[in-house]
Image: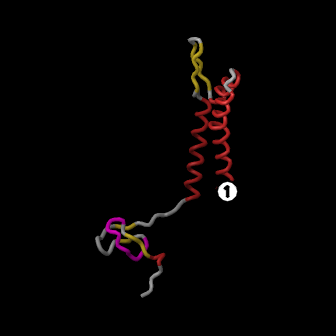
């Protein structure tokens, strides 16, 4: 009897090679259940993308940067912190925060939307 390689499935317990018989696979050696993994690449990508976009909104609405200057505490959002650092001459730090926190995540969102469509 000739069997295709695609019909073979390995037992996760004893690693015996078995013939895939559908949903009710049992190992011929140890009798444990064998399950095939289904791939949901597009669905997982959309789920992660939507979750990331939802989490991105509060990250940019709530104060993330707290600055202390002359005994005063001032909290600001990421974009407000970038503007604050830029106004006070910390250009390299402001650019790093701007690119790492705003430009790169938004670019990733747009690229993932483009790639999954």
Magenta range: 12-22
Instruction: Measuring from the top left, give residue 40's x and y in whole percent.
Output: 54, 60
The residue indicated by pointer 1 is: 117
Query: To which quarter of the image does residue 83 belong?
Result: top right
Q: Quadrant of the C terminus?
A: bottom right
Indicate whether 30 appears above or below 53.
below
Q: Nearer the viewer, residue 36 or 5?
A: 5
Instruction: Measuring from the top left, give residue 71's x and y in whole percent.
Output: 56, 11
Query: To which quarter of the image does residue 26 belong?
Result: bottom left
Instruction: Measuring from the top left, give residue 42's x and y in whole percent.
Output: 59, 58
Farthest residue to the bottom: give it: 1
Instruction: Measuring from the top left, give residue 6's x and y in whole percent.
Output: 48, 75
Q: Is residue 106 left or right of residue 1?
A: right
Query: To which quarter of the image does residue 23 belong?
Result: bottom left
Residue at x-position 57% and y-position 22%: 66
Q: Is residue 110 left or right of residue 23?
A: right
Residue at x-position 66% and y-position 37%: 99
Farthest residue to the left: give it: 30
Is residue 16 magenta-colored?
A: yes
Indicate whether 53 appears above or below 22.
above
Magenta-drawn stretch, dominant element (helix, strand or loop): loop
């Amino acid at each position: 009897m000739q069997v295709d390689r695609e019909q073979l499935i390995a037992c996760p317990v004893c690693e015996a090679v078995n013939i895939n018989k559908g949903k009710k696979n049992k190992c011929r050696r140890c009798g444990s259940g064998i399950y095939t993994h289904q791939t949901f690449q597009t669905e997982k990508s959309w789920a992660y993308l939507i979750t990331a976009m939802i989490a991105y909104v509060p990250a940019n609405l709530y104060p993330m940067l707290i600055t202390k200057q002359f005994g005063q505490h001032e909290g600001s959002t990421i974009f407000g912190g970038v503007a604050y650092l830029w106004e006070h001459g910390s250009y390299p730090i402001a650019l790093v925060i701007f690119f790492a926190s705003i430009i790169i995540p938004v670019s990733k969102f747009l690229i993932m939307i483009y790639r999954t469509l």
